[in-house]
Image (cartoon, rainbow, N blue to C red):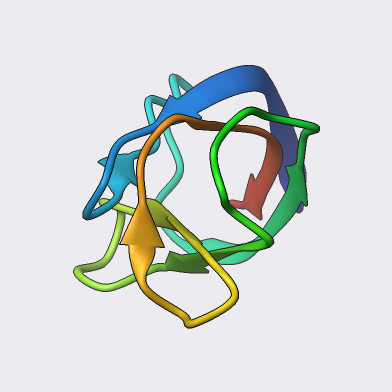
Amino acid sequence: HLEGQPLNHQLVAAGGSLIPYTKPFTKIVNIQITLQANASSAVTAESTKTPNLSPKVTAYNAAHTSVGGASVDLTIKGW
């Protein structure tokens, strides 16, 4: 069955950061991201599930340029 793992206050580096989850997922089907109020210029955060089981989150400014210093809350869902 589908399970989730929340991860709070994850710092995102410029160029993105791998998500340090601990559940033994065999497939990740969804990653929900909430960008926290931060001192960086980030206005959005996006994730990738490729390569499989090594998801990465990247924060972007208004020009869609990757920036560091943002903090996010995440929930990874999979089985």
Q: Nearer the viewer, residue 19 or 1?
A: 19
Q: Work out whether 47 lies above or below 35.
A: below
Q: Position of residue 17 (x, y in %)?
A: 29, 41
Q: Is residue 51 left or right of residue 32?
A: left
Q: Is residue 20 found left or right of 70 in the rendered image?
A: left
Asked if 17 appears above or below 65 in the picture, the reply is: above
Q: Who's the residue at 54% across and 23% down the image? A: 10
Q: Position of residue 72 (x, y in %)?
A: 65, 35
**In front of the other: 20 or 37:** 37
Number of marks in the image? Answer: 0
Residue name at image x 77 percent, y 34 percent: 36
Instruction: Say which residue appears at 80% left-offset and 32% top-offset.
Output: 37
Q: Residue at x 39, y 36 (%)?
A: 19
Above or below, 41 relative to 70: below
Could you say where residue 12 lies in the image, as x and y percent from the top left? 41, 35
Picture quadrant of residue 43: bottom right
